[in-house]
Image: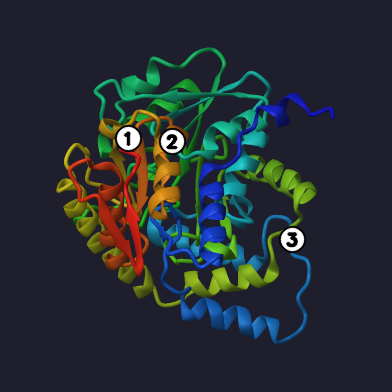
Amino acid sequence: MSISLIGASINESATLKINEMAAILKAKGEPVIHLGGGEPKTRAPIDAIVSATGYMNTGAVRYTPADGTPEMKKAIIRYTEEFYDKKIAPENVMASGGAKQSLMVALQAILNPQDEVIFPAPYWVSYPEMVKLCGAIPVPAYPEDGTFYPRLQDIEQLVTSYTKAVIINSPNNPSGAVYSEEFIAGIVEFCERKGLYLIMDDIYHRLIFDGKKPINSYNYAKDHTENSKLIVVNGVSKQYSMTGFRIGWAVANKKLIEVMTNIQGHQTSGPSSVMQKAAVGAINGVQSCVESLRMTLENNRNVMMDQLNAFEGVRAYKPDGTFYTFADFSVYGKDSTRLAHLLLDKVRVAVVPGVEFGMDGFLRLSTCGSVKEITEGIERIKWALDPNSPNELYIGNRKLTRDWI
């Protein structure tokens, strides 16, 4: 069988694979605790459900424009004015089938083969693969000081004549780090000065803890014309607990949005009309659901940190936002993939190996579940890895005996 060079270079999504494996085990009746998931457990906002249901009841569910319905674009414009203090036109907006599609289409619109795209590490698992799908080269930037917080010089020193874009994801998946205002201001100024595209992946931007506020990249941009190379990506998946609705969007200069719309039109046509109705309902509806989710996640973060801090040998870093904790388990093995498979196989706890985010020896743990799931999940992990733990563990009525340490 003949496979393209690009196709052969693309790896499977680790997060989706873990989800699949956990779902299969759960369907068999296994007592799986999913600490690997990237979706909140709370229900979608009632405003989203009512809006979508009312539209479906008309029976007139049709195709939509490639860049989104006028109603959807109005909602995005309103959202951008309210949360970014930025006035934009409909021609600056493209709705898509999730923030991931907005990112992919943006990269396809700006990249040529051999172009380079820089992003801080740890990074979302899909960034390198999306860049490679465009025939371009992903360039991870590892903070020189060993933290999860990049400095401008960490990015600057990697820029070459092939560099086309920088991707910034803050709050960050997987670390939960919120980058400093100084860094965001510096990277906006740097990219403008160098003529680089700056893609702000803001999908988690309202899920921030400890009284911190989202940092608005538009506040530091000097170029507010249609020559701006700043692209802001967002969506309803995370903050509104609407992962399955698959609606995201991009805000950029009009010419770039036109090109992105052309690409999307040939790839998938317009996003689902039903899902756009739901997204409009969420954006225009009561926003207390976002704060409620944020508070739940902050409490879950605190529980997770208490559990991990009592776990001998594990180094846990307190997240500033999102619903992930990125913890260093290397004392129990440098191979994070082996660790993740061991935990799912032996104690039925799903986690995502850190190597997929550019840092082996780490595990990404989700705080999307209940306090009980977090507590019991870490208890199982500790029993599986810590040689000082008792040799036996009960999961429900099942007695496990540890025979691998």
Residue 303 position by quadrant: bottom left
The one of 233 and 44 positioned closer to us in this rendering: 44
Say what secondary structure mark 3 lies in: loop
Looking at marks 3 and 1 on the same chain, the residue that comes earlier in the sequence is marked by 3
The one of 4 and 405 positioned closer to us in this rendering: 405
Residue at (19, 36) in percent of width and height: 313
- Decide if residue 20 is on the left or right side of residue 398: right
Amino acid type of the residue tagged 3 in the rendering: Pro
Amino acid type of the residue tagged 2 in the rendering: Arg
Residue 188 position by quadrant: top left
The percent coordinates of residue 315 (x first, y second) are 21, 38
Q: In this view, does 34 lie above or below 309?
A: below
Residue at (45, 43) in percent of width and height: 341
Q: Which color scheme does this rendered protein use? A: rainbow
Looking at marks 1 and 2 on the same chain, the residue that comes earlier in the sequence is marked by 1
Q: How crowded is mark 3: few (under 14 residues within 10 Å), some or many (20 or more)?
A: some
In the rendered image, the quadrant that contains the N terminus is top right
Residue topped by disc 3: 65
Of tags 3 and 2, which is closer to the observer?
2
Q: Are marks 3 and 1 in contact (CB under 8 Å)?
A: no
Which label number is shown at residue 87? none
Which label number is shown at residue 185? 1
Q: Can residue 30 be seen in this view?
A: yes
Of tags 1 and 2, which is closer to the observer?
2
